[in-house]
Amino acid sequence: MYLELFKLRELPFRLSPDPQFLYLSKDHARAKAYMESTIWFTDGFVVITGEIGAGKTTLIETFLRELEKDVVVAQINQTQVSTLEFLQAVLVQFGFNPFQMKKAELLATLNSFLVEQYTANRKVLLIVDEAQNLGLRVLEEIRLLSGVETTKEKVLRIILAGQPELNDKMDAPELVQLAQRVRLRFHLGALSEEDMQGYILHRLEVAGSAGREIFAAACFEIIYRYTGGVPRLINTLCDTSLLAACNLDRDHVTPQDVQAAIDELQWTEFAARTAAGAHALMIHGKPARSPERATERAQQRAPLARLLLVTDGRTVTDMPLYPGRVIIGRATNADLRVDSRVVSRHHCQITTNDKLCVIEDLNSSNGIYIKDKRLRHHNLNDGDVIVLGTHQLMYIDERPGLRAHAQDANADTGQHKIAVPPA
């Protein structure tokens, strides 16, 4: 291989998940923080989604490596199973031999185990990877398992991780009760070009580059163009590029080596592959979905709504809302940061899709209020004013027809209408 030529201790771009190579982009750090929150809060699920190769499994392995010894973990990776097989798999992870048990015995054994661990001051965590493959019945069984509790709190912490299809399942009408139990959802997108360069340099440094420039600066733009910032694709292209340079006995990678690797892989540019994939899905009668769905929509579509942050009667921020989730809070990694002591680090979230926009309190200390009523969950209407302590969020729906309809309805019912600033 090329290790000796490039003076590396180990292969920097292996596809197998290895926690020591994890590069914490802003999104990965936030997803990891959400996972860590399950150890301290037991009042709901955490759901992490991401495209194939986005780094979900590596993130999970890193999270598990850092857990304290008082956390007992069941990690399920095989998810094309029946309800009975799923319960058996969970009990196997906890050290039982459950294959002769019927369902009632499986549940009784699991419930007794959870209560025993709680009594012994141990925390129990269930992580399900590739959760998009779970059937609706298995997901409903997981919801029922989450209901096991003592007189003080729930005793089973749950993280579901999977591809974006998991979000579609969570939003299915049959699983409305499960969706209500989800405390935090986060989607891992592709890396930005800047993060991609940091990712490559980080992996080389871990592998022993010691700061040496192995990839010429001109390589990064090409790599990004052909990988779209997807970590698994970055690994494949960088590894092949190192081999191409090695074949020429060159101890650094040039743009010509990257191009040779692209030719060997027979790749077209990422944007073209994505468009072709979307077209193929439409031909077969299925909805097209891009691996950079959220980013592309933000660039190509008008916003579905706007959120105005108002402080002391003055508009501080005018934030467009696209399909996806926005976290609002005091934390520096919040999508909309409100720097105030009365606002929690992750105070609330707003979920937007083509039909509606929903705000949800994330167990904040001081809550969210609309018309002096404290709410946990609310479907936003055009003109709604959400109060966060001394700050207000004005919601303005930009969807054609909906905004006018909402304002007409407000006029009919005598509700107060907000003067909307020009877009």
Image: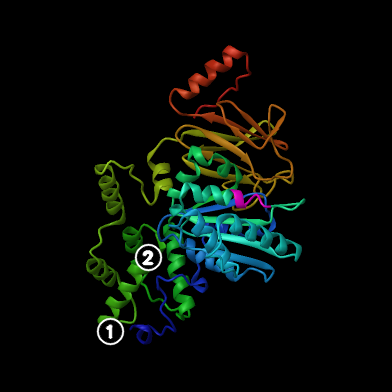
Of the numbered discs 1 and 2, the one sitting upstream in the chain is: 2
Relative image position of residue 133 (x, y in whole percent): 43, 54
> Residue 354 versus residue 223: which sits nearer the camera?
354
The label on residue 234 is 2
Q: Position of residue 122 (x, y in %)?
A: 71, 65
Mark 2 is on which residue type? Answer: Ile
SS category of the residue bearing label 1: loop
The picture places residue 327, in percent across and down from the top left corner, at 58, 46
Q: Which mark is residue 351?
A: none
Is 101 in front, or is 246?
101
| Three-letter amino acid code at the position of disc 1 | Asp
- In this rendering, which labeled residue sits more in front, label 1 or label 2? 2
Is residue 313 positioned above or below 259 on the image?
above
**Residue occupied by mark 1:** 249
Q: Residues in magenta?
A: 144-148
Furthest residue in direction bottom, as rendered: 4
Q: Residue 76 placed where, x, y %?
A: 51, 62
Is residue 398 toward the left or the right of residue 182 in the image?
Answer: left
Q: Quadrant of residue 199?
A: bottom left
Assign the N terminus to one quadrant of the image.
bottom left
Find residue 245 and report its image quarter. bottom left
Secondary structure at badge 2 equals: helix
| Pointer 1 local density, CA inside 10 Å: few below 14, some 14–19, many at least 20 | few
Question: Local crowd at mark 2 within 10 Å, few (<14), some, or many (≥20)?
Answer: many
